[in-house]
Each structure stands twice: as C-alpha cells, then as structure tokens.
C-alpha cells in the first residue's frame, strides 16, 4: 500500500478542460518526490488537491489506504511551504514557529521544546528572538521550512519554496533541504519548474505536461532514459535528428539512417518496428568532436563542418553542421585540443548507448 495514492484524479476549473487529467500517482512513505513541469502543467493544482485546498473533480486521493477527499486541510496534518509564504513580520521567529502549535493548543513547555527542535533542524539554533526583517532571504525561507516542520507533519508539501532566492542561495538551500530530508525522512512532495533543482534533490521526479505525468523515475533514469521526446527535451539539453529506422531488434537495439545516409545505432525508448520514421536524441555532453580521419571504433560517427566554438569555462560548446542537420557538442576543456578549427571538416562521435530513439 502506498503512503499517498492518487487514483484517476481529474481537475477542471472551467468544466471544459482537465488541467489534471486522470492522474495516477503513488507516493512512498519517506520519499522526496518532485513534481516537475512547465508553467501551467498542473503541478500546483495537484499539490493543492493533496493539501485539501482544491477538490478533485473526479477520482480519489488516499492516505495510507483511506480516502481523504472529505478531510479539510487542517485535519490532514501536512506541513506547507510556498514561494511567498511570508512570515508574520511583527512576530519574532520563535512566535512565528509557535503560532501553528498555539493554534493546536499545545502546552507551553512542549511548544518551546518543539520550536527549539525545529530551529535546530534548519540549522538556525538560538534565532528565536529575531524578527524576520533581521534575517537574510535564505534564513527567512529556512524559518518558513521550520514552521512547516514544527508540528511534526506526516507529509510536507512545498511549492517553489526557493523561487524568490538568488541562484547561489537557492543552490545552497537545495542541498540543505536535501540534507534535512536525508536526516529525518519526512515524506516530501516538492513542486518546481527548475529541472536542475529536481535532479539535485529528488528520490523520484514526476515530469508533468498538460496535466499528465509523462514519466516518473529516479533522476538518473529520467536523464539517461527519457520515456518520450517531451521528457528528453524538457530535462537537460538534447540534440534531435530526424531519421528513418532501418533495423529494430527485440532487445531495443536499433539502427536508423539520418539525412545524408549515415547509419546511427541507438536504443529504442519504446517498442518500434522498421521501417518507420524516428527521432534520435543525444545529449551534447556525450558527443566528442575530432578531425574526420580520427578513428574510434564502435561509436556513432557523423561528419560535418565546425560552425562555431564557444569557450564556456568548464567546457567548449561546438556547433557542427552536416547533411543530417546541426549537432551541438559540449566538449570538456581537457579534450578541446582535438576540435578542428571553425570552418574545417570534423566528425561528431558518441556511443550507441547514449542515443535514444523515439518513434515518429
Ligand atoms: N483557481 C484557478 N481557476 C482557474 N484556472 C486555474 C486556477 N488555478 C490554475 N488554473 C489553471 O490550471 C492550469 C494548471 O495550473 P497550475 O497552477 O496547476 O500549473 P503549474 O504547473 O503549477 O504552473 P506554474 O509552474 O506556472 O506554477 C493552468 O492552465 C492554470 O491557468
Ligand atoms: Mg505552480
């Protein structure tokens, strides 16, 4: 039995379009699950239904097997952190944290102990007497997290909690929230449209598009084995090449011919049969660029001409154009010596295992 289960959950606001469409989602106890997707894909709506602020138009949500459709938000015992879930400015940090406990009528000594514990959890011990205005943005957000943890919720829901922070602070907070989760294992559902954030923090990522989950898997699987072209292009960067499938083995290994006649080997994302049109997807960091006479047996090799090289610190970005179209490669600086000059003939090489083949 899952900790949380969405069963065929639909939500429409206007009675016409489902912004969440027949959603099935099982959340395991203790996991950190991110809902990742573009703006308007239904992430917040999904979270709001779980929180109890929105009701599903159809379907059910279960918690430990019991339907919670009729349970109001305050009875669900979930902690919540939102992007602009501001602290009460006239209350100290301690009073802000004590507030949800006072509402729950806990005894005074218990409240003090819990406030202290929650501040320790977010690494702000002794900050009780400060006012929010006397804290940095990151510290305020940590207090907001502490306020969500202070009543020891069985589930914590976060909607773009780091959206208002600058990049450096956001990356630091990502690691802190991840560390917090690893120490305490409170089941967490985390909404973001930032793929790097989801990859950094999650045990699993559910990729949303148009109210449906396109793929739900651990970060590495999402990145290395995207289930469809939407996931391949939304997560990270990828080259796409139009091709014609010429061989498709039962084991998923296949061969496709790109424009210009070069045959590329790869693995199929879904069952497919040759001949059929296909799209190949390759990550730029999987591609090496070398002179055309360079031999590397076993790899795919696509000839072209170097159009542009850009030095980006850790890697060199190379744009290569051939009969099959444009290919972008991110070459680590220590391998950049092999890149032919702009205008020269070159070959892009990458392993068959790094080529994902999508039907259509
Ligand atoms: N209260 C509402 N009334 C009517 N339509 C709504 C309401 N809330 C959301 N929508 C619509 O439902 C769709 C999904 O919205 P939702 O807020 O769930 O998206 P999201 O994935 O969280 O996007 P974002 O990344 O921009 O926050 C959008 O088309 C949005 O316009
Ligand atoms: Mg949202």
Image (tube, rainbow, N blue to C red):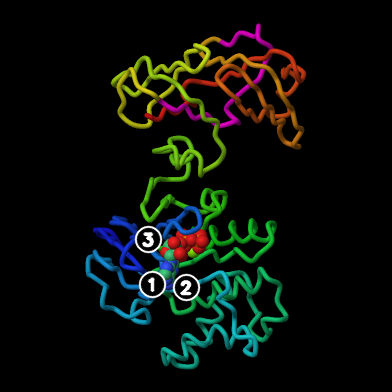
Decide: is 355 above or below 52: above
Decide: is 41 above or below 341: below
Residue carrying label 2: 80
Residue at 60% x, 71% y is 142
Decide: is 354 above or below 110: above
For label 3, the crowd category at 10 Å Cα-Cα, with few meaning under 14, some 14 to 19 and many 20 or more, is: many
Disc on the earlier residue, 1 or 3: 3
Dots 1, 2 in contact, CB < 8 A: yes
Does the residue tagged 3 have its C-beta within 8 Å of any atom of ligand 1? yes
- The CA span between labels 1 and 2 is 8 Å
Q: Is residue 215 left or right of residue 310?
A: left
Q: Is residue 201 left or right of residue 5?
A: right
User: Which quarter of the picture shows residue 177?
Assistant: bottom right
Reply yes or no: does residue 292 show up in magenta. Answer: yes
Q: Which residues are magenta?
A: 278-296
Residue carrying label 3: 19
Q: Where residue 51 is drawn, which disc sits there?
A: 1
Reply yes or no: does residue 289 show up in magenta. Answer: yes
Residue at 28% x, 59% y is 2
């Amino acid at each position: 039995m899952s900790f949380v289960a969405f069963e065929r959950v639909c939500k429409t606001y206007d009675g016409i379009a489902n912004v969440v469409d027949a959603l099935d989602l099982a959340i395991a106890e203790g996991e950190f699950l991110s809902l990742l997707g573009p703006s308007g894909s239904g992430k917040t709506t999904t979270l709001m239904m779980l929180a109890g602020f929105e009701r599903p138009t159809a379907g059910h949500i279960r918690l430990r097997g019991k339907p919670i459709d009729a349970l109001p938000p305050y009875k669900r015992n979930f902690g919540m952190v939102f992007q602009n879930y501001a602290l009460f400015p006239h209350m100290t940090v301690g009073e802000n944290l004590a507030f949800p406990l006072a509402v729950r009528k806990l005894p005074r000594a218990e409240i003090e102990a819990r406030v202290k514990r929650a501040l320790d959890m977010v690494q702000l011990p002794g900050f009780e007497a400060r006012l929010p205005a006397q804290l940095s943005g990151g510290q305020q957000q940590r207090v907001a997290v502490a306020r969500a943890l202070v009543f020891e919720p069985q589930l914590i829901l976060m909607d773009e909690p780091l959206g208002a922070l600058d990049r450096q602070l956001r990356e630091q907070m990502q690691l802190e929230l991840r560390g917090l989760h690893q120490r305490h294992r409170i089941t967490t559902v985390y909404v973001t449209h930032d793929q790097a954030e989801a990859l950094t923090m999650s045990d699993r990522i559910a990729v949303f598009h148009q109210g449906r989950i396109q793929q739900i898997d651990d970060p590495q699987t999402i990145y290395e084995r995207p289930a469809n072209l939407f996931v391949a292009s939304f997560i990270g960067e990828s080259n796409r090449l139009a091709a014609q499938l010429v061989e498709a083995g039962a084991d998923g290994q296949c061969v496709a011919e790109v424009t210009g006649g070069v045959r590329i080997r790869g693995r199929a994302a879904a069952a497919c049969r040759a001949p059929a049109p296909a799209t190949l997807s390759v990550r730029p960091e999987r591609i090496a660029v070398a002179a055309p006479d360079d031999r590397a047996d076993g790899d795919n090799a696509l000839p072209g001409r170097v159009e542009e090289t850009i030095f980006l610190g850790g890697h060199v970005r190379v744009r290569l154009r051939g009969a099959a179209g444009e290919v972008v490669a991110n070459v680590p600086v220590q391998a950049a010596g092999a890149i032919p000059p702009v205008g020269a003939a070159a070959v892009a090489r990458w392993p068959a295992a790094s080529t994902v083949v999508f039907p259509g």
